[in-house]
Amino acid sequence: MQQRDWTDGHVERWKPVLPDLDPDIEGAVTRMKKISVHLRRVREQSLVDFDLDRQEFDTLHKLAGRGGKAAPSELAADLDLAPASVTGRLDALERRGFVRRRPSTTDRRRVDVELTDEGRSTWIGAMEVLGHEEERLLRTLDEEERTQLNDMLRRVMVVAEDRGGAAWD
């Protein structure tokens, strides 16, 4: 017999109220939501553990995604923020020793923002906490099951994105 979870009880409570409720759809959607909330809580706790706020982490994350070096205007575009907002973030991160600004080697008018070793290790540390939890949860499935789950969720995402869903990251 398969082990029950909170969602099984949720579906059972709602089925008599909504007789047309598809228990597989309700179960899958509810489980995806609950897993998402769980992972968000783990991520938020990792930020607390590494003394980062969400904005600092997001900025370090976008900078790391650009190989650890970017112009402030590139970060502003990546973060969908006004350049002045990024300046404030970069000032705070620079005071903490997580980034440094340097004159561009290719354009004298430009400044590049670089991730410092401390900034990289802090970002990686926060990322690893979440990565370990994702790994812990999904290792309950074997490799073939993880591939199937990934493929099935891709099919669902293609439909969601086709309905005007923005590029999420």
Image: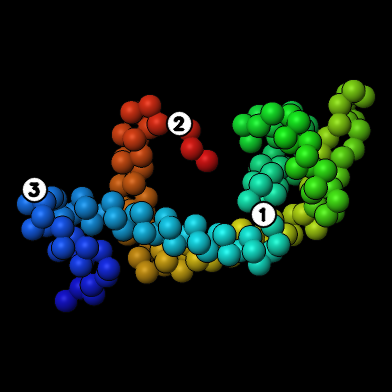
Nearest the viewer among 142 and 14 is 14
The disc placed on residue 20 is 3
Q: Which residue is mark 2?
A: 166
Amino acid type assigned to the residue bearing label 2 in the image: Ala
Q: Residue at x 23, y 72 (%)?
A: 4
The furthest residue to the front:
17
Q: What's the residue at 34%, 54% (across, down)?
A: 32
Secondary-structure class at tag 3? loop
Q: Please provide percent x and percent y for residue 31.
A: 31, 58
The label number, if any, that marks residue 34 in the structure image? none
Q: Amino acid at mark 1?
A: Asp
Which numbered disc, 2 or 3, marks the residue that appears first in the sequence? Answer: 3
- Mark 1, mark 2: which one is toward the viewer? 1
Secondary structure state at the residue bearing disc 1: loop
- Cα–Cα span, label 1 and label 2: 25 Å
Contact, mark 2 vs mark 3 (Cβ under 8 Å):
no
> Which element type, helix, strand or loop, lies under badge 2?
loop
Question: Which residue is tagged 1?
Answer: 53
